[in-house]
Amino acid sequence: MKEDDSRKVEKYGLGIAPYFISIALFVGGLFFTTVISSRDSFQADATRLGRFLSRTATYVLMSVSQSLAAVLILLYGLKLDIGNVPLFIALVFAASLTFTLIIQALVTWGDQVGRYVAVIIMILQLTSSAGTFPKELLPDWMQAVHPWLPMSHSIAGLKAAISSGDAAVVYEQLSYLGIYAAIALAFTGLYFAVKARRTAEASPLERDGALQA
């Protein structure tokens, strides 16, 4: 056997940090939807496109604020020893945005049911994202699910950014997170497009009721 300590992590906190950072960012995204409606607008006569843009912009702004607070606390409050700080910051912002957009899509389509699905996904990620133990130690069905979970990619990217600073690994995980974010954003946009079409095809009385709703 040959020992390789090129990616050695001196402290347990650094080893577990990617897991808890990802959990915190996901929970933060879930919290946003309980504070701000994912469907309604402050303007009663806002169009569906306007509602989509305003809700998405609001969630993106909150996600950026959350990421900025996390980065400042981790780097200057807890003083984490990061192998590649720029890539670490990029991962935090990308993971937060991806989680927020996924949760926004689920809640926009399903409301309370969507939040329930988001919680189920979070629980599944807690056990299957290999945040505490290597994925090889997971049951076979969890290993099969592992690559499809967004938190798996945020954790893998954060581990690389913190321990080795391996840019290739980080860029790969960023690309996966970007795909998830784009799909979620399109899914949210589809909801407002479908609602707009139904409103346009409805009778005047039904249309007035839909706009009020």
Image: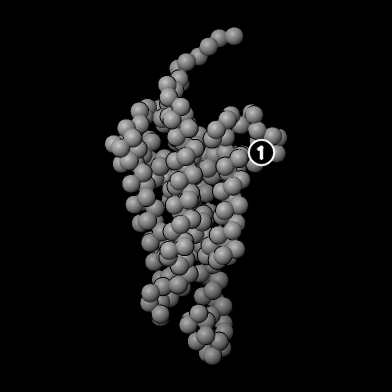
Q: Can residue 167 be seen in this snapshot?
A: no
Q: Is residue 44 above or below residue 70?
A: below
Q: Is residue 66 above or below residue 57?
A: above
Return the x and y of residue 23 as percentages of the image width and height: 49, 44
Residue 104 in the image: state x and y as whole percent.
Answer: 49, 59
Locate the N terminus and report the quarter of the image it occupies: top right
Instruction: Specify whether residue 212 is in view.
Output: yes
Q: Which residue is mark 1?
A: 142
In terms of image quadrants, where is residue 70?
Answer: top left
Q: Image point 65% across, 36% down: which residue?
A: 143
* Secondary element at image label 1: helix
Q: Position of residue 17 (x, y in %)?
A: 44, 34
Q: Is residue 5 above or below residue 54?
A: above
Residue 160 in percent (x, y) is at: 45, 30
Mark 1 residue type: Met
Residue at 57%, 84% in the rendered image: 202
Is 137 situated left or right of 35 in this image? Answer: right
Farthest residue, direction top = 1
Furthest toward the left, the residue is: 76
- The residue under the point 50% across, 64% down is 189
- In this rendered view, identify the residue nearer to me: 138 or 39: 138
Considering every residue shown, the one lying at the far right of the view is: 140
Q: What residue is at 51 percent from the left and 47 percent from the top?
A: 179
